[in-house]
Structure formats: structure tokens, C-alpha cells
Amino acid sequence: MKFKDKVFIITGATSGMGRAIALEFATEGASLMLNGRDVTRGNEITEQIRSEGGIANFFAGDICDESVNRSLVEETLQQYGKIDGIVTNAGKLGLGNVTDIDSDKWHQTFQTNVHSVYYLMKYALPEMQKSGSGTVLVNASIAAFKSFPNHPAYCASKAAAVALAKQAATDYGPEIRVNAICPGPVDTPFLHDSAIAFSDPAKAVDEAKDATLMKRLGQPSDVAKLAVFLASDDASWITGSAYRIDGGILSS
Ligand SMILES: NC(=O)c1ccc[n+]([C@@H]2O[C@H](COP(=O)([O-])OP(=O)(O)OC[C@H]3O[C@@H](n4cnc5c(N)ncnc54)[C@H](OP(=O)(O)O)[C@@H]3O)[C@@H](O)[C@H]2O)c1
């Protein structure tokens, strides 16, 4: 098991990729502190992991709030006594072009996709420094590199998230590794919500699938397996990287 006695915080673990990452990390023996706002789904994933012999707790809260991030770290220390890694995975779409988007929605998108990453790093990195090692994974997007119609806040915030991961790798290495994951179209509720930006959402999802070289949407478990690799000692020489996992869509 790659994560025996290792403690990870995973945000946005109540759905999609965060949920899949939680399940894969638990299988690898990790002790998990899971976050999301939906208590019912949070309790459900926590109970599933426990029923399969894993170790997990759920901390409900809106990750846009700095104090929630501080409490998330404090609760993790209280439960497990240390932090070996964080996966900042919660994300927001914030659709609308530059002239139409409500400025509150713009700021909320940056709060979720960038500021929350900064907040969790701010409170978790010192704990990893105490133990002399750690790993940070930022779930960004290929939207950091490619434009999508009506996604300005999303594209700009995901580019900022990648830049933040690369920068943090500079300040906190060599003890702490920081990497970004940049998924293409992954079959989660989020993808189908993003398709609303296109005139024919169902067609847009089909076209995204066809545009991949693998001719399929990604599954949350595809991304979870990359997350396991990057957070594990197998990736001990990888830091400051942005890993595309997109079925080849950006190479087509
Ligand atoms: N699906 C794709 O095609 C795709 C592609 C590239 C990148 N991504 C990125 O991948 C990440 C995961 O997305 P997904 O596709 O797995 O979406 P998803 O199934 O909709 O899950 C999103 C998760 O984020 C959580 N979340 C959102 N805002 C939050 C907040 N303010 N505080 C706490 N938790 C919050 C949600 O939890 P609650 O509902 O419980 O609050 C949920 O667990 C996101 O960062 C997204 O931008 C997705």
C-alpha cells in the first residue's frame, strides 16, 4: 500500500473526481479528512470507505471561507496528529462571458478555484514542513491552456491555479512537492454543467468525447490513479509540473 500511515486532506470529495481520489487513496491505506458542503454525500462516501476497512472522516464546509480551511487543518491534526498531503479539488465553473458575467460570480469562481487553494496551502504547508516532507496536488484543468466559450473566469482561474502550484513548488521544495493535474473532459456532473455554455449541450459532450484521441470521456478513476501516482513516492522527482490527463484532446 502506497499511503499506509499517511494523512491526506481532499476537498470536493463528495462527488466526481474528489470522490474517486478518496476511494483510491483509501485503498492505498491513507487516513483521510474529506471535505465538501453536502453533508449527506459527505457522510455517504465516509461510510463507504469505513465499511471497506479504510480510514476517513468528513469535515463539512465552504472552502471559499478562509476560516473553514484553518478549521479543516485543525480538525485533521486533532484526528490524525499530522498532515502528509493535500488534494485541492473543489471547483466552480462560473459561466458567462466577460461582459455578461455577474462580478459576484467572477469573484466566487476565483474564490473556489484559486483562493481556496491558497488558504489550504497557507494552513497545511507549515504542518508538512514540521515533518520535513509532504505533497500538494491541485486539480486544475486543461482550461488553464485552452479557451472554451463563455468560460473566462474558469479558464483564467485554472491558469492561476497552475501558476500557484508551480510557484509553491519553488518556495516549499525540496521537502514538499507541489503539482497540478489538468484533466480534459471527465464524466462528472461538472462536465455536463459546463456543456450548458454551448448551444447544444448534449452535442458538445459528444464532440468533446470524439475530439479525444482515445474516443471516450475520462472517468473519475482515471484521474484518481494519476493522483495516487503523483502523491506517492513513485513520483519523488516530480514537482512544479502540470500533468495533462485528457485522452489526448489537446494533441488532436
Ligand atoms: N469534469 C471535468 O470535465 C473537469 C475537467 C477539468 C477539471 N475539472 C476540475 O475537477 C475538479 C472536480 O470536478 P468534478 O468534475 O469532479 O466535479 P463535481 O463532480 O461537480 O464535484 C465538485 C466537487 O467540488 C465540491 N465543491 C464545490 N465548491 C465547493 C466549495 N465552495 N466548498 C467545498 N466544496 C466545494 C463539491 O462538493 P459539495 O457539492 O459537497 O459542496 C463536489 O464535491 C474541479 O476543480 C473541476 O474544475 C473538471
Image: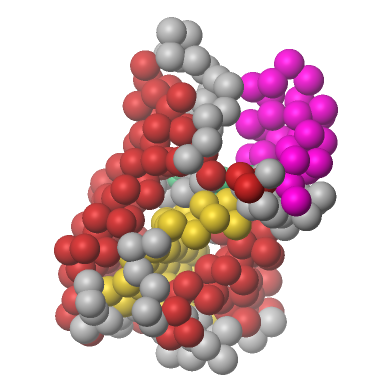
The region drawn magenta spans: 188-213
- Seen at 21% across and 63% down, the residue is 170
Is residue 112 part of the magenta span, yes or no? Answer: no
- Between 152 and 12, the residue placed more toward the observer is 152
The residue that appears at 45% across and 75% down in the rendered structure is 231
Residue 128 in sight: no
Quadrant for the C terminus in the image: top right
Give the image location of residue 141, x and y in percent: 52, 46
Q: Is residue 63 left or right of residue 125?
A: right
In the rendered image, which quarter contains the N terminus? bottom right
Is the image coloured rainbow, by chain, by secondary structure, or in one colour? secondary structure
Whether residue 95 is situated above or below residue 250 in the rendered picture: above
Question: Number of callouts in the render?
Answer: 0
Of residues 181 and 28, the one drawn nearer to the viewer in this rendering? 181
Do we see residue 176 in this rendering? Answer: yes
**Residue 166 percent across, percent down from the top left:** 30, 56
Q: Where is residue 89 in the image (x, y as percent from the top left)?
A: 48, 54
Majority secondary structure of magenta residues: helix
Q: Would residue 200 be counted in the magenta stretch?
A: yes
The outermost residue toward the top is 99
User: Residue 212: percent from the left, percent from the top?
Assistant: 73, 47
Q: What residue is shown at x 47% (from left), y 9% (from top)? A: 100
Residue at position x 46%, y 41% from top? 144
Q: 167 left or right of 161?
A: left
Q: Tell me the quarter of the picture where residue 174 sits.
A: bottom left
